[in-house]
Image: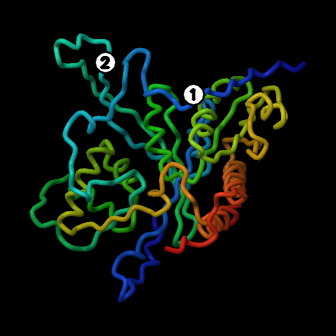
Amino acid sequence: MTVALPRRQRSPGPDAPWVDDVAGRLVRPYTVSRGRTRPTAHFDLMTMVRATGRRPAGLQGPDYDRVLGLCGRPVPVAEVAARVRLPAVVTKVLLADLVDCGALTARTPSAASAGPAPRTDRALLEAVLHGLRQRL
Amino acid sequence: MDFVNDFDPRLPGDPEADSFPTAVKVLVAGGFGVGKTTFVGAVSEIAPLSTEELITQISVGTDDLSGVADKTTTTVAMDFGRITLGPEHVLYLFGTPGQHRFWFLWEELSHGALGAVVLADTRRLDQCFAAVDFFEGRGIQFVVAVNEFDGGHHYGPEEVRAALDLAPEIPVVLCDARQCASGTQVLLSLVAHLLSSPVLTSTPEPS
């Protein structure tokens, strides 16, 4: 016996601001608090970082050491944050400091900087397709 | 853990630009309990990782005359996994937080994403309506993957498509979120769908 599936109604238009029934309007922490203005702080979760081999002059501390220790190979911000168990927003500040002193180099993948509906190039998609097929 | 360590012959004239693999991102969305974490874990080459975002919540409707709104800071975790596709490409899969209140995180997560997988459970199909709305409203390409649970009534893809009122070009596939091969097939259907998209650029834009 078939039970009728519930039907989705298409939404009428763009979403209103994010408002939670209980908490009210939700705002990012750096919107209401300090926000670094240094350009190196423009990390997103997929920004790749790697160590340059240069010592971080002037930056001391176990957090910097742990972060730097994870960056011997190219690694995205999300993975660094997860492995050091710090919130992403905090990890980004540490990474920005390390980039500023030359101990890290960073790159935001072009596909990840093209906006919410990127014009993705065919070569990239074909490489992804090929890589996935090899896993089967 | 030994991915891309061996691919970095630093080019003399090109300092560090080429020493990064291209990281691409796919979102895995759907309602609470639909199997997002299972899906990510099944296809990922690493045990799923979790990153936290700090969320500051400001209550509206508090007394504006005080000039200070009530603020609380909480965290929300986002699970993700990794698939190394070769020396030059690595795919990250992000499970999106299910609760409505964290949806603004989807805005950041979806920025630059290749596309999305909307996981659907036909026992609770309405759980995925919001995800479909989200991606549809922003022009983000997605596929719908119906997670087949044992014992549930199996609906055909066309029944699910009709119920979701999907555009005809959007793929609807069946999957078992616990199986790596099945999840990989879902990702392949997403990439194939992206390759058929009319907005694709075949070569870099001349400038």
Q: Which of the two marks, 2 or 1, is nearer to us in this view? A: 2
Picture quadrant of residue B70: top left
Residue at disc 1, secondary structure: loop
First in sequence: mark 2 vs mark 1? 1
- What is the x, y in percent for residue B93? 54, 49
Q: Which residue is mark 2?
A: B59
- What is the x, y in percent for residue A117? 55, 51
Q: With respect to residue A109, does B106 lie above or below? A: above
Q: With respect to residue B25, does B68 lie above or below? A: above
Chain letter for the residue marked with disc 1 in the picture: B
Picture quadrant of residue A50: bottom left
Q: Which amino acid does the dot numbered 1 rest on? A: Phe
State the separation of the CA atoms marked 2 and 1.
Answer: 25 Å
Quadrant showing the C terminus of chain A:
bottom right
Residue at disc 2, secondary structure: loop
Q: Are marks 2 and 1 in contact (CB under 8 Å)?
A: no
Residue at the location (84% across, 36% down)? Answer: B158
In the picture, the disc for residue B32 is 1
**Residue placed most toward the observer, A9 or A104:** A9
Residue at the location (72% across, 41% down)? Answer: B176
Residue at the location (56% across, 52% down)? Answer: B44
Quadrant showing the N terminus of chain A:
top right
